[in-house]
Amino acid sequence: MTDDDVLAEFRAADALLDGHFVLSSGKHSPAYLQCARVLMDPARADRLCAALADRLRAAHGEGAFDLCISPAMGGVVVGYEMGRQLGLPSIFAERVEGAFAFRRGFEVPAGARCLMVEDVVTTGLSSRECIEAIRGAGGDAVAATCLVDRSGGAADVGVPLTALVSLTVPVYDAAEIPAELAALPAVKPGSRGLRA
């Protein structure tokens, strides 16, 4: 699957948005990729995650992982689907008092080779926090994967990151927003709020 094929899937799902968006990192951007809309179609989720699973096998080999772990909320569906594609169990970490933790009876077996699965990586902060939780629970976070790396490969998550598509999408600190972007109403479409 080429980058154009991946972006065509996002466009077909009305999930590649233009405007003024406040990302979960707090940074501002003129573009937003709404993975939840892409993943709501099981056939589309299957196609995208099958292609990503092939990339992971090529990068790490067959049987490189024991467990898929994703950060809630955005990573839950893609984490489940990657687990299905790779034939692995899939669990998620969720924020408890601001830090990722494992609840709902989820456990990370000591030494388990864990694949951290995200929908979108921008700065890599949530990914690093999830990886820290994996290690804190006794797992070995050996690699990370995501549908979209919107940092163009610049984000450092602390382990090798395999993305289905890598884009360079501008992001700005609140104090550095260009005038043309600042003129648009800011929308926070992610799971941490609706309006900035």
Image (tube, rainbow, N blue to C red):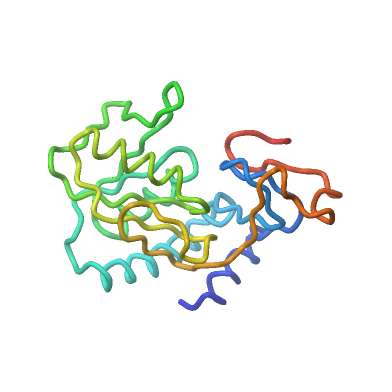
Q: Nearer the viewer, residue 156 or 21?
A: 156
In which quadrant will I find the N terminus?
A: bottom left
Tell which residue pokes out farthest to the right in this image: 183
- Identified at 46% across, 26% down, the residue is 98
In which quadrant will I find the C terminus?
A: top right
Residue 129, compared with residue 15, is above or below; it is: above
- Identified at 39% across, 70% down, the residue is 51
Locate residue 60: give its quadrant.
bottom left
- Identified at 51% across, 66% down, the residue is 152
Residue 127 place in picture, x, y as percent: 40, 46
Residue 122 place in picture, x, y as percent: 52, 53
Residue 128 place in picture, x, y as percent: 38, 45
Locate residue 103: give its quadrant.
top left
Tell which residue pokes out farthest to the left in this image: 111
- Number of marks present in the image shown: 0
- Identified at 20% across, 41% down, the residue is 139
Compared across the picture, whether 90 is left or right of 110 comes to right
Compared across the picture, whether 185 is left or right of 110 comes to right
Tell which residue pokes out farthest to the top in this image: 97
Residue 121 place in picture, x, y as percent: 48, 54
Compared across the picture, whether 75 is left or right of 186 comes to left
Q: Nearer the viewer, residue 164 or 15?
A: 164
Locate residue 30: give its quadrant.
bottom right
Q: Nearer the viewer, residue 185 or 90?
A: 185
Q: Nearer the viewer, residue 48 or 131?
A: 131
Residue 48, compared with residue 156, is above or below; it is: below
